[in-house]
Amino acid sequence: MAKVKKSTSIAIVAVLALAVIAGGLVKMSSGGSSKGGTITYLTHAEAWTHADPSRNYTGQHIAWFGSYMHRTLTAYARAEGAAGSAVVADLATDTGRSSNGNKTWEFTLRDGVTFEDGSAITCEDIKYGVSRTFATDVITDGPTYAIGMLDIPSAKDGSSVYKGPYTTKDNDTAAYDKAVTCSADNKTITFNLKRAVGDFNYTTTYLSFGPVPKALDKGDAYDMAPVSSGPYKIEKYKSKDEMVLVRNDKWNKSSDPIRNAYPDRIVVRFGLAEEVRDQLVLNDSEKNSMS
């Protein structure tokens, strides 16, 4: 069941999926939208396996974190029906430019894109974020499209000769630096692929192709404190208990044509029995709650 109320006493008739896909969009009974309030999700189990963008794999998890916290070079359009399958520019100025028979793809970053500390997102941040995929002993459970697609040789055992950013032993960093390059102004990233991929810009919708600041990366522990590039950031995260997102005041709406960021806060409570969730909603104990 689902019941949602706005703290300003305006009834909302949105379902959970709409809130997820539209980046916190809540449709009012009047047909309009407004900012403010808190959305609370009440869940039985923890709603995701990982918060680290490099380790998000399922469409549901990518949609949730992609709506609230993690931006990517490209993204799916926030629209219903067939229109929602279209790829649009997100951090990038367009949906990518291919050459070399679709074996080379480049993306230029928008002006004004920043992390939650206000620092500019650069090509090197994207490149570093993608590099983490190759550290399969540390960054587990995430998509491995970068390993399969980038023009990096394989070792005798079939694994990539590049092992990610956390080790120097038998690690061919030069091969990665050749496959992924940054322009002199650190605004344009180029991916060189093993084979032609005409829809590579769909691959770059995965959060594993998003930015991670190297200085703040904690390897496996980054899962509990990922840095936001979107409209919300983590205020509190206790696994199996609760996650609280608040507005990221360093996010620039002018640089983000996709996300509306209507609520002020998003609260996710984990580990609630079904009867407890239902009672909280029915009693209106949790304002703006979704079960």
Image: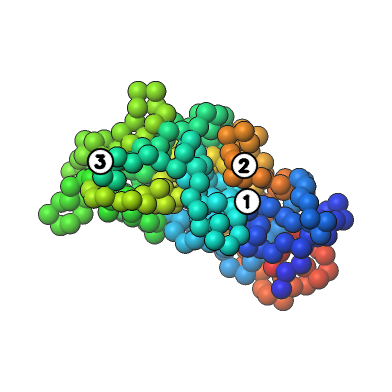
Closer to the chain start, of discs 1 and 3, is 1
Residue 225 can be seen in this image: no
How many residues crowd mark 1 within 10 Å: few (<14), some (14–19), many (20+)?
many
Name the residue nearer the viewer: 49 or 104.
104
Name the residue nearer the viewer: 135 or 106.
106
How many residues crowd mark 2 within 10 Å: few (<14), some (14–19), many (20+)?
many
Residue type at mark 2: give it.
Pro
| Contact (Cβ within 8 Å) of mark 1 with mark 2 | yes
Figure quadrant of the C terminus? bottom right
| Contact (Cβ within 8 Å) of mark 2 with mark 3 | no
Question: Which numbered disc, 1 or 2, marks the residue closer to the eye?
Answer: 1
Q: Which residue is mark 3?
A: 100
Q: Which residue is mark 2?
A: 231
Residue at 83 percent across and 69 percent down: it is 283
Give the alpha-carbon distance from disc 2 to disc 3, as whole Å. 36 Å
Give the alpha-carbon distance from disc 1 to disc 3, as whole Å. 36 Å
